[in-house]
Each structure stands twice: as structure tokens, then as C-alpha cells.
Image (tube, rainbow, N blue to C red):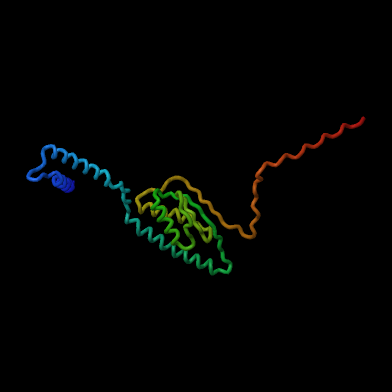
Amino acid sequence: MALPTLALGLVWLLLLRQPGGWPQADGWVLGALAVALALWARQRCTTAPATPPTPRLRWRALPRLLGVFVVQSLLGALDVTRRVCSPRMPLQPGLLELALRLPTEGQQVLLALLVSLMPGTLAARLEGGRLTLHALDTRLPIEAEVRRLEGLIAALYASSPSSATSSATSTAPASGSASAPKFAPACPQAPPPAAAPAPPRQP
């Protein structure tokens, strides 16, 4: 603050300096007001936006997260190889949608990246705190593995997952020919005509 004040004061003196003398008293007062106004405007225009706080990491939780990720990746690779090489091809691909419990978007993106790097699963969409996964076999305990990774990531970021319950929705393609979809009629159908009354019996 001192350096800009001195620079502005020198500029003001050079502008008001008269040949053979210095400015009068009113020039000094106006100069002080002008320098103060310029410094106030500079501070208002160059105020940096508030930066979000830096996340506090627990580095002791990182080896456990890496270990679980490496082990699950190796087991997943072996399982995918076994299924692909099997003559019966025991696969049931489909989509699985999960409501994430991690509080911040950065932690949710990290979870999606880790899940995508594991064989047999791929993060297809992340929006609004909901993660859509594509899995080779929806019968596997994929949700349990994702929840385990969530807990490890929360421990790494020193945060607690949300306690709200979340439901998983699985969508698998049906085998065989797909049936035609049923559409509701656009206009309500007219009711059937009432039956004519029976004629009276003759005595």
C-alpha cells in the first residue's frame, strides 16, 4: 500500500508543480483526496474473489485406498478374463444407478475415475450426485464395492459420507425378442352403448 501511495503522490506533484515553486496549500489537499480516492478505487477493483478452502487430506488413509484399488483391479481382471474365455459366456450387462453419499463434487469425480479404472465397470454418467455405471454382470455385488470405495475416499478427505439412504436401480437388457411397447390412447374412448331394455312378457 505504501508504494502505490508514494507513486500516485509523485505523479500528482509533477502535474501541479509550477515553475520556480511548489503547489499551494489547496493543491496539497486536493492531491491527498485524489490519491485516497484512487487507492480506494484500486482496492475495490482488484479485490480477489474468495478462494474455497483447501481440502485437508489424511495421508495415512492413502495406502489403504491404493491397496484396495489394486486388489480389486486384479480380482476384477481375473474375473472378466474367466467370463470372456468361458464357452457359456456368463455375462449379464446392464446399467446400475447409485445415489452417492460423498459430500463434494471433487470426491464424487475421484470415485467415478476409480470405478472406471476397475475391470468390468465403467462410469457412464455423473450428474446431481447420482452415478450411472455400466457393468458386464449386474448380478455382482457392485454396489457394495462402490460403497467401500466411498468410505475410503471419505477417510482420505477427512469427511463423512451422507447418512441418507440411497437406492440402486439396475437395468439389464432383456434376452430374446423385445415385445412391442404399450401406449396409452391419446383421447379417451367413448363408452360402449347401453343395452336395449328387454320387451315385457305377454301374459
Residue 9 vs residue 103, the one in the foreground: 9
Residue furthest toward the left?
20
Q: Residue at x 38, y 48 (%)?
A: 160
Left or right position of 43 against 169: left
Q: Which quarter of the figure has residue 149? A: bottom left
Residue furthest toward the right?
203
Is 141 situated above or below 31? below
Is 99 situated above or below 76? above
Residue furthest toward the front?
19
Q: Residue at x 12, y 45 (%)?
A: 17
Q: Quadrant of the C terminus?
A: top right
Q: How many marks?
A: 0
Expressed as whole percent of the image width and height from the top left, the position of residue 46 reads 26, 47
Residue furthest toward the top?
203
Q: Which quarter of the figure has residue 60? A: bottom left
Q: Which quarter of the figure has residue 196? A: top right
Expressed as whole percent of the image width and height from the top left, the position of residue 117 reads 44, 62
Is 117 situated above or below 159? below
Expressed as whole percent of the image width and height from the top left, the position of residue 175 reads 61, 59
Left or right position of 200 against 43: right
Residue 119 vs residue 200, the one in the foreground: 200
Expressed as whole percent of the image width and height from the top left, the position of residue 187 reads 67, 42
Left or right position of 82 against 187: left
